[in-house]
Image (cartoon, rainbow, N blue to C red):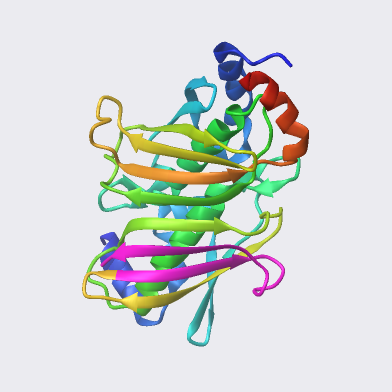
Amino acid sequence: MDLFELIKQARENRRINEMIAAVPYAKLLGMNCLNLGEELVFILPVAESNLGNPTLPAIHGGVIGGFMENAAIFHVLGMIQTERLPKVVDFSLDYLRPGRFQDTYASCEVVRQGRKVVNVSVIAWQNRSDEPIANARTHLLL
Amino acid sequence: MMTLSRDDIFVQMQQIIPFIKHCELLGIDVLDAGKGCLTLALPYSDEIVGNTDTGVIHGGALTTLMDTACGFAAMSALEVLQISPTLDLRIDYMCQAQPGKAVIGEAEAYRVTRSVIFTRGIAYHEGEKDQPIAHCSANFMRLDPEVVSPTESQSEK
């Protein structure tokens, strides 16, 4: 079965973890998704392989970015009836606090859905969602 | 204070970057380095694929490549290598990377002020720099400017 067919089937009951399992890079990061009613919370469990600065220690900024980018894609796949895998056009990330060596969470919001492009806002946090470690916005081509 | 030579910087980058846990996982390698500039390579691997139908790598892996390239270009722009936290990072994806090919990430620190280091970079396949895969710009904070600036003002004279 091709990837998008699998994603379409997984979308029916919002089985996001099945989608994640089908994307090698998302699996490499070790992320997963928690369905809370109509909300999706993405989780990046702590992993030594995701470290950037070993002395602090801190999660690699690129991993935080990659995790949030994935979160935006899976959020859109779960929430919007797309006809193909969305493509990231641009991704802009503000780092607000250091990403410490602990579990990281992310949630997304579709800010605006146009005909071809969707604007998604993503926040990532560790201890409390009102103390984000990063926020991002991205445009995805549908 | 001795200024680091181009070779010193290259050796230092080779000693640091491939051993950062996540860079090691992705196999990121140092191709070239100098003061305020850095070129890295991200090898192709099935593990960083974003779309298994096409074999195209995930943009997130490019984010790590470019964040690392810009971050260490920023560090090497200073007189003394110094950790510089990322303020922000923006990536524009112009075209998809080709399956099976390594991606080169080239970054430069184009402006260093008392508090901030401004960097930019591009990602491309070897020999196809005129067809970039992605553009990136990232800004970094300088820590303890009052400690670092006396050295810098001397070297600028």
- Report the residue at 40% width, 63% height from top: A138
The N terminus of chain A is located in which quarter?
Answer: bottom left
Query: Can the viewer see residue A23 in this picture?
Result: yes
Query: Can the viewer see residue A49 in this picture?
Result: no
Q: Is residue B53 above or below residue B134?
A: below
Is residue A95 within the magenta segment? no
Question: Measured from the top left, where is residue A132 in percent x and y?
Answer: 63, 67
- Report the residue at 35% width, 50% height from top: B92
- Report the residue at 53% width, 31% height from top: B73
Question: Measured from the top left, where is residue A77 in percent x and y?
Answer: 35, 71
Farthest-out residue, right: B147
Q: Is residue B146 above or below residue A101?
A: above
Farthest-out residue, bottom: A37
The C terminus of chain A is located in which quarter?
Answer: bottom left
Q: Is residue A99 above or below residue B42?
A: below
Tell me where the magenta segment starts and ends, as one range. Answer: A118-142
